[in-house]
Image (cartoon, coloured by chain):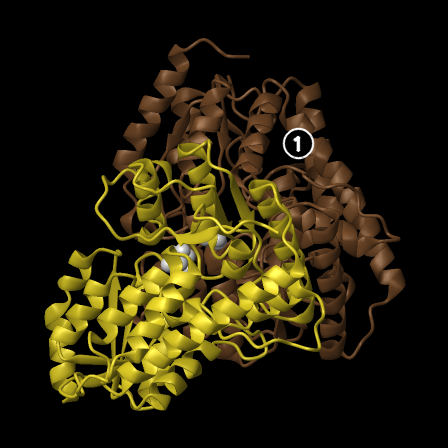
Amino acid sequence: MAERSTERIGFACAYTPLALIQAAGFAPYRILPMGDWPDQAGQLLHDNLCPHVKRLLDRAMAKDLPDLSGVIFVNSCDAMRRLADAWRKVRPNDRTVLIDLPATADALSVSFFGKEMERLAGILDEWSGCSINAAEIEDSLFQYGQLARLLSDLSNRNRRGALSGGSTRIQELRNLAVTEPVEQTILLLQQALAESPATMNGQSGVPVFVFGNMLPDPAAFALFETCGVHVVGDDFCTGSRMFGEYEPSLSEPNIFRRMAERILSHPPCARTFDPGQPIKIASDIVNQAVACNAQGVIGHTVKFCDPYLARIPMIREALKTANIPFLFLEGDCSLRSIGQQRTRIEAFIEMLR
Amino acid sequence: MMKQYFDGLVAGIERTLRENPENKSPRKIYALEVAKLGSRLYSGKKRVAWCGVTAPFDLLNAMGVTSCFVEFVGAMLASTGMAGAYLEEAEHAGYAGDTCAYHRGVIGAMRKGLMPEPDFLIATSVPCTGGLAVMETLAKHFNKDLFVLNVPQRLTEESVQYLADQIRAMVAFVENHTGESLDKENLRRAIHFTNEARVLTEEVYRLAQSVPSPANGRVLSNFGIVMALLLGTKAGVDVATAYRDEFRKMIDNGESGVADEKLRLLWIQNRIQFKNPLVDMLEADYGAAIVSDELNDITWGAIDPEVPFEGMARRAISIPFNGDVTRRIAHLQQLAKRYRIDGAINPCNWGCRQGTGARGLISEGLKEIGVPVLNLEVDCIDSRNFAEGQLRTRLEAFTEMLNERPSIW
Ligand code: SF4
Ligand code: SF4
């Protein structure tokens, strides 16, 4: 069995199978685009590329990373593929792998993605020098399932306005969950849940559902809160989308295929869709907003993100039809860019009150 | 409106070919087939499938489906000088101005009723994420069924099997919509045409490598990507034959595509689709001939009629825009060597993440073998911000620099 260690494996996308990394004895470490680094990535990539990816490359070029035993990329979009290429150039000594990711979750794609999971397991075996077994993966899936449940409980508490620290704290905990060993985060989450419920901290805020691609910075949520937003639900790849609850499946004996099925059936990022229900993302967002009694929806995407930018107009239309006010913000992963939108957020909340 | 346009184009080219048979240039024959395709797409009478770039068009042709990648519409709007209004339409509707204008043009056309309503859609995950998104949007808009082909990144037996199985499922999807089964004989014939066109096209490219080259900056522009639409048909074979014969004749007669060819250029990815004077300027002022385009190459083997879907899967996986950038660079390096390239031009089509995101590494890769690259900032569809003067200056400086260095070949 692989020894539990604090050796870290870097990753950049919410479709990464964290349970597999941890089963291989590594701690998954999400390389988050939070920080200040010289702007260099545009030269190697292009300025017209998603700032998430550019900032990760800036971070790599600035060597502002912990020791990593390897980095896993997932073919989630063109920008991410290019990040994998550029990463190999700027950090030639890193061990890296790019896992393929289908855009749909049909049976053929689940089976193919399952094989990609198996390939990744083999690569992790090489990196760790040990061999992962199915029982370890099961354990690990169970732990991540537990983590997901705890985070979801905390989000529910926040929805009721009864979590001290509100959505800012949730985001801090989510960031810990993707950068620190899972056992450690589970303890922290349990402690947070053991606190007595705060006295309706969100009472004065207007309930809003927020969605988009990336919003990792807790300070962005703090800013929302100071603008009068009570985040009652969210859908970001740095937020709720990162963790899906785990249900052991009796019908699918192959563990890799099961993981594939689970990851592909996560609440999807716009890059994954069901061809049988095109632009279902729009009705999903409406339904999510309704389910959490939001009075309005804020969409926040980093610029140049094709998967989201292409779907925003139809999302806007669906929200309009459902009579749900919508505010769309574009940013560049920096707090500054979101700070510049303060007046618009405040005006939106005023309008909702 | 588009139907009349394409019908008029077909009639015009046919008349010219009839009246001046001696002027039967391969480019005219190619243009005729493209116009005929446009006319079928807009006829309102044919079964139409809007597709992604790497769909198996020969298979769809064998199934009696008029199929075309949607980007064709973006390019058509640009080449006819109509793109501006459609791009604006998309932008007014909230489609971001910094996305690929091929796709924005399609969305504008969709919203203004210029896209023929398809019977169904077949999206492909390669070459780009934006392409998938536009197909999903079209499916929603037209309320038509969508099939997605996920093209894997790596060429392995498993990935070939995955895509081949998807193509099999696609056949069932198409059969369900047309109510007709795939006719084995039609398929066999289509594969025969594909393989014939493949050999002829390879020969065309081989001839284009001659020094001086029979090719120039116009004759093979968009050729490789559009030829994919004609695969599986006699028309594809005829077009390739016309090019081969013309190039052979030119070489035998000592003629070249650009008189007094001095520089040989490689064009990376997209051509600028709207009218512009840059290619003429390169040729007339600098004797610089674009002898190779990145997509003008055969990267796949003959399709085995016994296992056709596997061959089609390999073909889709093999396109240079797929996979990691080292594969793309290796391919560009090969082209540079085969064509004895002096310099390469990358327009870096604004909004194309897969393409522009690789520009730095591509430049370095070609520099490694001594081929300088000029990276431009051009939107290949949207002429509204076309900085002609600035581009002229940069191209001039580049060609002058190339002229001053000794040939590396
Ligand atoms: S933010 Fe969008 S473009 Fe950027 S990595 Fe995520 S999905 Fe890709
Ligand atoms: S230019 Fe790039 S983004 Fe646009 S259609 Fe081609 S590959 Fe896709």
Q: Quick check: A199 above or below B72?
A: below
Q: Is residue A300 visible?
A: no
Q: In the figure, the brown chain has which letter? A: B
- Picture quarter with the C terminus of chain A: bottom left
> For the residue marked with disc 1, what is the amino acid?
Tyr
Q: Is residue B284 left or right of residue A342?
A: right
The structure residue drawn at horizontal position 65% and vertical position 54%, both measured from the top left corner, is A118
- Along the line of sight, which residue is nearer the eye, B7 or A269? A269
The structure residue drawn at horizontal position 37% and vertical position 68%, both measured from the top left corner, is A187
Q: Position of residue B338 (x, y in %)?
A: 62, 23
Q: Is residue B321 left or right of residue A313?
A: right
Q: Is residue A193 left or right of residue A260?
A: left
Q: Which residue is mark 1?
A: B205
Q: Position of residue A283 (x, y in %)?
A: 43, 83
Chain of residue at mark 1:
B
- Along the line of sight, which residue is nearer the eye, B8 or B161? B161
Q: Is residue A209 visible?
A: yes
The structure residue drawn at horizontal position 85% and vertical position 53%, both measured from the top left corner, is B307
- Image quarter where ligand 1 lies: bottom left
The structure residue drawn at horizontal position 42% and vertical position 23%, both measured from the top left corner, is B372
In the rendered image of the structure, the colour used to display chain A is yellow
- Along the line of sight, which residue is nearer the eye, A205 or A10? A10
Q: Which of the 4 image quarters holds residue A173?
A: bottom left
Q: Quick check: A337 above or below B379?
A: below
